[in-house]
Image (cartoon, grey):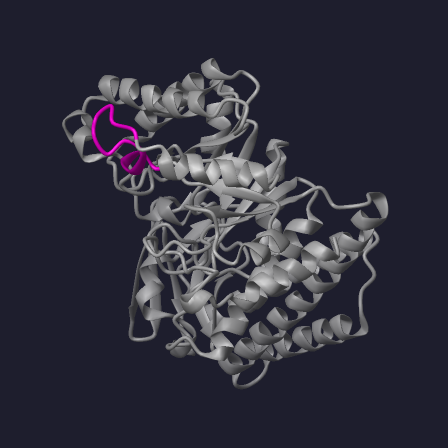
C-alpha cells in the first residue's frame, strides 16, 4: 500500500543525504510519512497512506538548496518523471498565487510576466519535446526565479499598503539574550524587544537552589532601556532542559508535572509586573529528547500554563512550534500535525495568547529544511487560520552549499534574514520577529555578534527595515 515511483533523469538535483526526509503532504496539510530509496535512477517511496498528495523533497539547484514540491499526484503503476512533476508543482503554485494576489489588487511587473511566460514555454518542451529532463530542470529554475519576483512584488506592495494605513507597522523586533549585549548601541538600533533565557537547568542547577543574578541583571538592563520583554522558554522539550537532579522523576508523569508547575510558578512570580509575556513551552509538538508521548506533553503543557496564569491572570502565554512544516512527523511517532497540536490545546481549554513559529533553516534535528519565501507566505497564511497573533523566531540560516564561511555565504544569510523580515512585515497576523542568538556561544544557532565584536551584515538589514517601517 502507498507505493509511488519517480524516474530521476538528473541525479544531481537530489541531495542524497536528505532523501530519507522526503515525505508527502495532502491538500489539508496532513503529512504522510514515507520510506524512500533511490536505486538505478528510480526513487521509490513507500507511504503509510494511499491518499493523493504532494511529494516534498530537498533539492540542489545552482548552488542553492530548497524543498521542492510536486502537484498532487495519485498512486499509479506508472513511473512518474520527477523533474517534470516538480516543475508542474512549482508552476501550479506560481499560477495560483499570481492569480490570487493580482485578483486582490497586486500590480504585476513586466519582468515577472515575461519569466512566467518563458517558464510555461520551457515546461511544455519538457513534456512534448526532446531533452525532457533538462528542459524540466530549466522550467524549475525559471519557476523559482518567477516565484522570487512575485514574492518581491507582493512584500513591497503589502508593506507600502500597511504603511499608508498606520504611522508605524505594529510589529516587535527582538533578539534572544543571556546577558546585557555587547555593542549595546547597535543592538538598540536593531531591536525594541528581548527574549530573555530562562532555562531550568541554568536557573535551578540544584533542587531549590535558584541562581537569579544573571537573569535579574538582564531584566534590569532591558527595563532601563524600555525594551519589551518575553521570558522563556520555561520548558524546552526540544532539548535537554531538565536539571540533572530531575532524572529520577522523568518517567513519573505526576511528579514531573508537579515539579515543572512549581518551577514555572516560581519564575513567573519573581518577575510579576516586569515580564508580561512568557513563552511557556518550546518544541512540545515534536517532543525532542525527553521521551514524552504526545498525550503526556499535552497534559504537561496544560499544567504549566495553569501554573503561570495562577500567578498572574493578565500575562500573555505563547508556545513555540518547532518545524512548523511538520518534517518531524515522518521520523517520529507523533500523529498531530503542528497546527492541530496547538488547536487541540486550545480546544482543551488552554488559554494561549500567541503562537511562536520557529523558522530556523538548516540540517539540524530541530531545524526546518530551507524553503523559498512563497512557502513561508503559505505557512504564515495557514497558521493565520487560528486567528491568533504570531511571532516568528529565526536564526542565521545554515547551508551546506557554501562549504567555508565565505563573503558570499554571509551575504546569502543576510539576504534570507531580510526577506524573512519583509515577509513578516507584510502579514498582519505577525506581531513579532525574533532572532534567536545575539552572542551566545553555547547554542547551535549562529550568533549575530561574532569574534572581536564583529556584527553580522544581517543586523544592518534589520536596522534599515526598522528605520523605514
Compared with 308, 57 (above or below) is below
What is the magenta segment's predominant secondary structure? loop
Q: Nearer the viewer, residue 438 or 346?
A: 438
Q: Position of residue 282 (x, y in %)?
A: 41, 37
Q: Nearer the viewer, residue 380 or 21?
A: 380
* Residue at 70% across, 64% down: 152
Q: Quadrant of the rendered structure where residue 146 is?
A: bottom right
The mark total stands at: 0
Instruction: Let me know if residue 86 appears in the view.
Output: yes
Q: Quadrant of the rendered structure where residue 368 is?
A: bottom left
Q: Position of residue 404 (x, y in %)?
A: 38, 77
Q: Nearer the viewer, residue 376 or 336?
A: 376
Instruction: Let me know if residue 1 appears in the view.
Output: no
* Residue at 79% across, 48% down: 162
Q: Is residue 208 magenta?
A: yes
Q: Position of residue 229 (x, y in %)?
A: 54, 36
Which region shows up in magenta? Answer: 199-210
Q: Residue furthest left?
A: 248
Compared across the picture, whether 300 is left or right of 141 comes to left
Compared with 371, 226 (above or below) is above
Q: Is residue 252 magenta?
A: no
Q: Position of residue 238 (x, y in %)?
A: 33, 42
Q: Residue furthest top?
A: 310
Q: Nearer the viewer, residue 447 or 366?
A: 447
Q: Quadrant of the rendered structure where residue 43 is?
A: bottom left
Compared across the picture, whether 254 is left or right of 445 comes to left
Compared with 365, 298 (above or below) is above
Compared with 203, 376 (above or below) is below
Amino acid at each position: 500500500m502507498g507505493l509511488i515511483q519517480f524516474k530521476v533523469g538528473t541525479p544531481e538535483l537530489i541531495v542524497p543525504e536528505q532523501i530519507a526526509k522526503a515525505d508527502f503532504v495532502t491538500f489539508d496539510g496532513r503529512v504522510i510519512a514515507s520510506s524512500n530509496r533511490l536505486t538505478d535512477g528510480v526513487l521509490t517511496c513507500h507511504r503509510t497512506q494511499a491518499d493523493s498528495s504532494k511529494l516534498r523533497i530537498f533539492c540542489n539547484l545552482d548552488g542553492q538548496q530548497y524543498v521542492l514540491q510536486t502537484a498532487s499526484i495519485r498512486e499509479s503503476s506508472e513511473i512518474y518523471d520527477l523533474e517534470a512533476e516538480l516543475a508542474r508543482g512549482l508552476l501550479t503554485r506560481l499560477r495560483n498565487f499570481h492569480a490570487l494576489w493580482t485578483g486582490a489588487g497586486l500590480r504585476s511587473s513586466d519582468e515577472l510576466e515575461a519569466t512566467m511566460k518563458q517558464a510555461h514555454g520551457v515546461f511544455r518542451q519538457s513534456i512534448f519535446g526532446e531533452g525532457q529532463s533538462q528542459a524540466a530542470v530549466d522550467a524549475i529554475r525559471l519557476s523559482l526565479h518567477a516565484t522570487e519576483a512575485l514574492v518581491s512584488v507582493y512584500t513591497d506592495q503589502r508593506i507600502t499598503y500597511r504603511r499608508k494605513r498606520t504611522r508605524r507597522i505594529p510589529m516587535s523586533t527582538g533578539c534572544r539574550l543571556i546577558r546585557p549585549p555587547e555593542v549595546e548601541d547597535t543592538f538598540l538600533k536593531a531591536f525594541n524587544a528581548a527574549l530573555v533565557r530562562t532555562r531550568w537547568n541554568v536557573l535551578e542547577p540544584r533542587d531549590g537552589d535558584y541562581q537569579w543574578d544573571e537573569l535579574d541583571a538582564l531584566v534590569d538592563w532591558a527595563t532601563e532601556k524600555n525594551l519589551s520583554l518575553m521570558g522563556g522558554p520555561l520548558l524546552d522539550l526540544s532539548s535537554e532542559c531538565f536539571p540533572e537532579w530531575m532524572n529520577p522523576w522523568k518517567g513519573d508523569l505526576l511528579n514531573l508535572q508537579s515539579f515543572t508547575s512549581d518551577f514555572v510558578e516560581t519564575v513567573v512570580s519573581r518577575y510579576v509586573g516586569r515580564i508580561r509575556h512568557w513563552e511557556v513551552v518550546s518544541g512540545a509538538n515534536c517532543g525532542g529528547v525527553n521521551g514524552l508521548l504526545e498525550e503526556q506533553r499535552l497534559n504537561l503543557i496544560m499544567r504549566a500554563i495553569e501554573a503561570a496564569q495562577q500567578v498572574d491572570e493578565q500575562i500573555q502565554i505563547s508556545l513555540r512550534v518547532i518545524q512548523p512544516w511538520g518534517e518531524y512527523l515522518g521520523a517520529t511517532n507523533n500523529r498531530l500535525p503542528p497546527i492541530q497540536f496547538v488547536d487541540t490545546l486550545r480546544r482543551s481549554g488552554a488559554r494561549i495568547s500567541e503562537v511562536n513559529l520557529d523558522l530556523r533553516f538548516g540540517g539540524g534535528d530541530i531545524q526546518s529544511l530551507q524553503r523559498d519565501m512563497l512557502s513561508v507566505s503559505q505557512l504564515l497564511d495557514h497558521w493565520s487560520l487560528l486567528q491568533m497573533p504570531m511571532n516568528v523566531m529565526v536564526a542565521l540560516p545554515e547551508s551546506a552549499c557554501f562549504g567555508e564561511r565565505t563573503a558570499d555565504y554571509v551575504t546569502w544569510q543576510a539576504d534570507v534574514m531580510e526577506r524573512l523580515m519583509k515577509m513578516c512585515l507584510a502579514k498582519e497576523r505577525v506581531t513579532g520577529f525574533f532572532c534567536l542568538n545575539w552572542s551566545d556561544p553555547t547554542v547551535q544557532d549562529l550568533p549575530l555578534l561574532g569574534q572581536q565584536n564583529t556584527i553580522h551584515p544581517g543586523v544592518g538589514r534589520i536596522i534599515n527595515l526598522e528605520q523605514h517601517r
